[in-house]
């Protein structure tokens, strides 16, 4: 009896001590947290001056996404004036030339949009133009929220050179649901089904496939999807390490299929931009367009709802693959407003920033901890597919090839769209690979 009383007394004393210590611990933690929050608030208030953010986000969806990031920045740093330096033109077709001139004149913007992968590393990493941002990843605890594969496409050796804000999917066929229903068409998942649907639509006086290749990248965009759909993910990836030839029979097959598709596009394609082509799908003058999921942001910015007015499907033959690219922002060396830029990059890479930006942009977060409830049905599907599909890098958006190689591909494409010479294109693609591999 005495013994058990003694144990009970010891137990009670221990519990109270634990409680006292943990309460003290809590108080200590609370005080530390409060102090950190105060410090952060003081830092936020302390920033002033300007911040020049260079991008090509001017269209519907991408413009709204960018504004959402600006909004967060302005709230945190009311004394910093954001200079929104945009050069219109999808995929950076005009912005990249302006940027190159500024960089070589030693006049970098405080930060600029750049695609993860070869565009980032081969153009800016190799030339040593960027300050590594490893310290931001460490300070913000981001190593727990960014997968190694993501870090590796941002890095040159051990140096992380940019902060990702999203992941886009390029291999999506978008379609007008009412037009499909009115013409009793089911969504094509193979090239045969695509051409059958295209014939039906054309006979009904509707443009089957909307294209706006005033910037030739959109034709390359469709072509990279046809390549993937024809070769499959493993051989597609082989195109970039020399194990699959660009003048092989299967690539010629893909070029032919692409050329055949051109018979079904709008006659004014060379006068339009990607978003003007997407508008044709909204208007119902065209039924489909093959575009990255920034088109989802565009459709939503025009008041449309996924699965209601517009549908989506992996581009023909590409189900099970996720053609990926990522928009990032970097810290050029010797910028005018380094601290303001670091504050911007912290927002770009944060959960708060990505969950505000991506639902509007039509992209998925590069982080692993999104609040899924903020993402619509299309984006939730894309997040799931990204986790389970074969990931392949986009050619048209800087992931798979350097800017020099990409320029060569664009030039070949400009010729191909007008002369439709499959053999000549295959030879030229192989020559470009030989020069750049
Ligand atoms: C891509 C970019 C996207 C989107 C698109 C059209 O290259 O990664 O974010 O903006 O161009 O402008």
Image (tube, grey):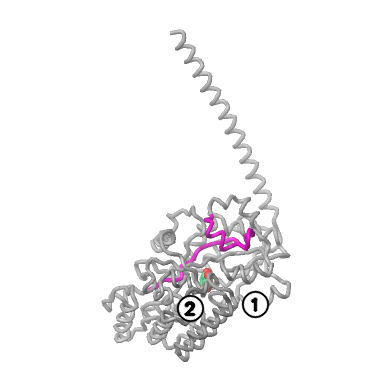
Which label sits on residue 98? 1
Q: Residue at 60% of width from left, 68% of height from top?
A: 120
Residue 218 versus residue 268 in the image, above or below: above
Q: Does the magenta stretch include residue 173?
A: yes
Q: Residue at 60% of width from left, 72% of height from top?
A: 86
Q: Distance between the residues labelled 2 and 1?
A: 33 Å
In the visual, does 243 lie left or right of 320? right
- Ligand 1 within 8 Å of disc 2? The answer is no
Tell me where the magenta segment starts and ends, as one range.
Answer: 146-174
Residue 94 versus residue 329 in the image, above or below: below
* Horizontal and vertical percent position of residue 78: 65, 57
Instruction: Please tell me in which quadrant of the rendered image residue 265 appears.
Output: bottom left
Task: Tell me the residue that label 2 is attached to.
Answer: 245
Q: Residue at 68% of width from left, 49% of height from top?
A: 42
Name the outermost residue toward the top. Answer: 2
Q: Toward the viewer: 158 or 262?
A: 158
């Amino acid at each position: 009896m005495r013994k058990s009383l003694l144990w009970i007394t010891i137990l009670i004393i221990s519990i109270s001590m634990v409680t006292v210590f943990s309460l003290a611990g809590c108080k200590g933690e609370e005080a530390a947290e409060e102090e950190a929050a105060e410090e952060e608030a003081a830092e936020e208030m302390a920033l002033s001056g300007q911040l020049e953010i260079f991008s090509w986000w001017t269209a519907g969806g991408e413009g709204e996404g960018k504004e959402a990031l600006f909004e967060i920045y302005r709230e945190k740093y009311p004394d910093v004036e954001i200079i929104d330096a945009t050069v219109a033109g999808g995929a950076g077709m005009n912005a990249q030339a302006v940027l190159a001139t500024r960089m070589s004149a030693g006049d970098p913007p405080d930060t600029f949009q750049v695609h993860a992968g070869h565009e980032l590393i081969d153009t800016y990493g190799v030339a040593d133009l960027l300050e590594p941002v490893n310290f931001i990843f460490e300070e913000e605890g981001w190593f727990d929220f960014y997968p190694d594969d993501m870090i590796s496409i941002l890095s040159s050796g051990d140096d992380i050179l940019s902060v990702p804000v999203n992941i886009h999917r390029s291999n999506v066929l978008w379609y007008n649901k009412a037009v499909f229903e009115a013409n009793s068409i089911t969504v094509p998942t193979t090239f045969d089904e695509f051409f059958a649907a295209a014939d039906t639509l054309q006979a009904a006086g509707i443009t089957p496939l909307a294209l706006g290749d005033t910037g030739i990248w959109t034709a390359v965009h469709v072509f990279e999807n046809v390549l993937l759909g024809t070769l499959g993910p493993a051989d597609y990836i082989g195109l970039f390490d020399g194990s699959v030839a660009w003048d092989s029979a299967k690539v010629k097959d893909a070029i032919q299929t692409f050329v055949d598709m051109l018979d079904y596009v709008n006659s004014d394609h060379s006068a339009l931009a990607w978003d003007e082509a997407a508008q044709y799908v909204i208007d119902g003058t065209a039924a489909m367009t093959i575009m990255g999921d920034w088109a989802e942001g565009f459709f939503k910015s025009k008041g449309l709802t996924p699965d209601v007015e517009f549908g989506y499907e992996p581009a023909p033959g590409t189900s099970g693959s996720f053609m990926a690219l990522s928009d990032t922002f970097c810290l050029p060396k010797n910028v005018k407003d380094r601290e303001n830029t670091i504050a911007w990059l912290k927002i770009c890479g944060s959960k708060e920033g990505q969950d505000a930006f991506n639902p509007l942009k039509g992209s998925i977060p590069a982080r692993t901890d999104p609040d899924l409830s903020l993402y619509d049905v299309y984006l939730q599907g894309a997040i799931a597919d990204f986790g389970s599909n074969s990931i392949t890098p986009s050619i048209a958006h800087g992931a798979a090839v350097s800017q020099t190689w990409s320029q060569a591909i664009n030039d070949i494409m400009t010729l191909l769209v007008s002369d439709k010479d499959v053999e000549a294109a295959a030879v030229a693609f192989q020559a470009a690979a030989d020069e750049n591999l």
